[in-house]
């Protein structure tokens, strides 16, 4: 069985931003800056990945809902893509986001990236999550 447990399949704008950032300090990165989401998915099919754990995380406050919905819909189209939710430090109703992701969407867990999201994981505002 082949499982990639750390994947960032993102909406086009975010995917391009991630790859531009990666190439800024690792120009030889093997994934081209202009790769499409569809190409990434096809590459996983080509290597016969059984599952990939797709990790999304909002960098800006208004992204949370759209990213989690994107990950849910991606899993609906490709059940072998296992979605993880996320939230932003400044999201107001973190409990509702957790409930939606784990309950309604059926996500297995959450991804937080304190360095990229610029927050302290011990910040009291994260306790509701």
Image (cartoon, grey):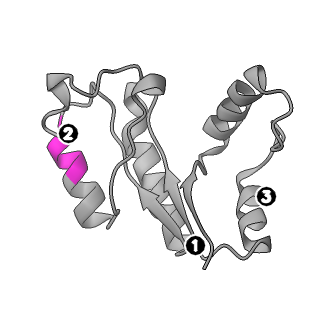
Residue found at x 33% / y 38%: 87
- Disc 2 marks which residue? 94
Crowd class of label 3 (few under 14; some 14 to 19; many from 20; radius 10 Å)? few
Q: Report the side of 45 relative to 57 (left or right).
A: right
**Is residue 55 located in the magenta-colored stretch of the structure?**
no
Crowd class of label 2 (few under 14; some 14 to 19; many from 20; radius 10 Å)? some
Q: Report the side of 63 relative to 5 (left or right).
A: left
Q: How many numbered circles does the render carry? A: 3
Identify the element where label 3 is drawn.
helix
| Residue 86 position (above or below residue 108) | above
Gap between marks 2 and 1, in whole Å? 27 Å
- Disc 3 marks which residue? 39
Residue 65 place in picture, x, y as percent: 37, 44
Q: From the image, which quarter does the C terminus lie in? A: top left
- Disc 1 marks which residue? 78
Range drawn in magenta: 93-98
The part of the image, by quadrant, that contains residue 48 is: bottom right
**Magenta segment main secondary structure:** helix
Residue found at x 55% / y 74%: 80
Residue 12 place in picture, x, y as percent: 67, 43
């Amino acid at each position: 069985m082949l499982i990639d447990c750390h994947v960032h399949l993102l909406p086009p704008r975010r995917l391009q931003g991630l790859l531009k950032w990666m190439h800024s300090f690792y120009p030889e990165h093997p994934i081209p800056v202009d790769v499409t989401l569809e190409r990434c998915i096809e590459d996983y099919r080509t290597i016969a990945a059984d599952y990939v754990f797709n990790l999304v995380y909002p960098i800006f406050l208004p992204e949370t809902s759209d990213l989690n919905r994107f990950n849910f819909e991606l899993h609906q189209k490709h059940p072998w893509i296992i979605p993880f939710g996320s939230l932003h430090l400044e999201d107001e109703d973190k409990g509702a986001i957790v409930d939606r992701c784990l309950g309604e969407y059926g996500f297995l867990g959450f991804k937080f990236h304190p360095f990229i999201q610029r927050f302290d994981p011990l910040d009291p505002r994260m306790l509701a999550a």
